[in-house]
Image (spheres, rainbow, N blue to C red):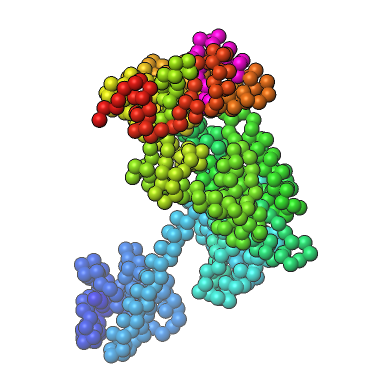
Amino acid sequence: MVVAIDDDAMILRAAAKALSSAGMVCHTATTGAEGLQLIREHAPDLVLLDVVLVGEDGFAVCREIRRTWSHEELPVVMVTGLDDLASIQAAYQAGANDFLAKPLHWKHLPYRIRHVLQANQAFTALQDSTRTLRSVFAAHPDPIFTVDTQERVTLVHSGIRGEDNDSRPPLGTLDELLPKELAAEVRDHCQRALATPAEVLTLEITHPYENEPHFWEGRFIASAEDRVLVMIRDITERKAFEQQIRHMAYHDSLTGLWNRHALSSTLERIFQDTIRSEGTPYPKTAALLYLDLDNFKRINDTLGHALGDDLLKVVASRIADVLRPTDLLARAESTDVESVARIGGDEFCLILKSLGSPMDAGRVAQRILDALRQPILLEGHELVVTPSIGIALMPQDGRDVDTLLKNADRAMYAAKEGGRNRFQFFDSSMACRLQERFALEAGMRRGLAHGAFHVHFQPQIDARTHTIMGMEALLRWDDPEMGSIAPTKFIPVAEETGLILELGEFVFREALQFSQHLQTEGLPPIRVAVNLSSVQMLDPQLLERIEYCIALTGADPHNLEVEVTESVLLEGSGQALATLNRMKELGITLALDDFGTGYSSLSYLHQYPFDILKIDQSFVQALSGASQGRNLATAIIAMGKSLGMELIAEGVEDLDQANFLLARGCHKAQGFLYGHPMSPTDFRAFYWDRVGGEPKS
């Protein structure tokens, strides 16, 4: 829509006709006041205004229009018959967007009007974009600069709210504002940005701010042929977060040591170095130490995972502290000197490189054993943890990460089988032993599910009358594939895997049930003894398991004897005493087994509520030898009698041993002389024979 203002009615009619033929609506006015009224009523897209009006000044009307509407809101095209430059300049000064000279070419008028409107629309769009850009700049928190081809730097936006962001004078040149090396990097990026106008280039630098180290990111993009826009952002916090993420990716969250991922990536790099050195005059040798804490699960189960975590932190610190600088390895991605990784709950690995000989790895392992042997005091508990350490050498014990880890793990299991608290180098025979161990574990799980385990019973005899006073329950395993397996072979595996808890409950249940069956048949009630391992002693549900078996079988607790060794008491600490006292309250008889083979602390006999002292078979066997063996047995018997304890000798095999024990006052015994371990059927017949009766059918 166009409003045309002219005092010549003929010109108005011609203009209206020309514009309407081009699809435009035209309203006409012969005076300035009338034209202003039409503008207010119809809000036209453009005003066509004659400079000379009767009794009026067209420039004044234009100025009046500009008081209300801007150039962008309402374009004004002034029409003048004056051809002097002063009139044209006056038209622009009054606020006109464009001008036309009379006489008008009516066919061209619509095109000229459209051109003015299009130009105005483009200008308006540019203004909107400019305002948007200024808003973006105002909201942008970071400083923005321009750098021209003369390397002059001008601050366009400071990132400070409310600060004037209009054009400013240059701050200086790159060389004046930046250190030499940094100025060269910025100069290079500016030149590259000008050469590739559509590309945004990024530069990360470190530069101090307020005497503190800071990380900065610069983004460069050409804003003109001779100017580059540079946006600067402080990325110190982002870098710190990225560093934290990288640390989490490579480190164990509890101990701060490497994790398995970091260990594997480092081993890959070391393998490349060692394999490349093969065939050279100085081939490299490195070692992987695989460390597992002995019986750590018991500490977690008895004292809680929180204390267990604290213990792992202390262990990790001791391992790291014991290593000398020559043992350490720095990962390529870090300048920190590290070589220790925690790869599982209580499993650690150490990498030792550039070894002079394999024995160097053994010396490091021994230092770790010595360091961890010292007691650790946590929350009032004095804890002793011992490690089993396996050592695998590279490249001879494995030419890839998985093989090396597997072989170090095998060596660690061999160290456990050898008695724990020791280190063991890998050898090829261990693979077979480890496979055998896994086969035992799988077989035990299968045997528990399919009834392959059985309980045999060995009689305990009063040597004076040869009457049966009790029986000891002994677990036996007959696997359909592996045959009969000795307890000394499968019990340690059961303890390590935790299967001993299920097996132990099975023995209690079978032993009590058999004892009840004997009484039901009319045989005199006798005590049945069940051995308790240290793993069972640390089981929080041990008493519940025993009470459940007693209730299930209906047995009298007084007919149950629980045998524990000195090692069980040492590892169980205060919990063992509380557990044994609770058993005593239930009426269970308590026996100290294998006395004299462990620490032989007399405090056990005073602190713990034992009823029976069992003389270990090693002392009984020694009776046939030198006098020292007989003296030791005599002393143990005398000590037990002085404490009012019942004495039972184990492993009695001949009459000389039996007579010696009887002469010293030990009347109860068990061993091959009196009876081998028997199946329930055979023991039942044996018992009936001793009491002079016949088994009931």
Q: In this view, does 375 lie to the left or right of 165?
A: right
Q: Where is residue 447 in the image (x, y as percent from the top left)?
A: 38, 44
Front residue (pair 467, 315): 467
The stretch in magenta equals: 633-652
Observer-nearest of 673 and 317 = 673
Can residue 508 be seen here? The reply is no
Residue 628 relative to residue 84: left or right: right
| Quadrant (top left/top right/bottom left/bottom right) for the N terminus | bottom left
Q: What residue appears at the point 34 percent right and 71 percent down from the top-left corner? A: 62
| Residue 635 among magenta residues | yes
Q: Relative to residue 158, is residue 119 drawn left or right?
A: left
Specify the quadrant of the image occupied by residue 33: bottom left
Residue drawn at x 58%, y 24% as measured from the top left:
620
Q: In this view, does 395 lie above or below 76?
A: above
Q: Where is residue 229 shown, x and y percent of the image?
A: 55, 66
Is residue 391 in the magenta section?
no
Image coordinates of residue 363 in percent, x first then y, are 72, 43
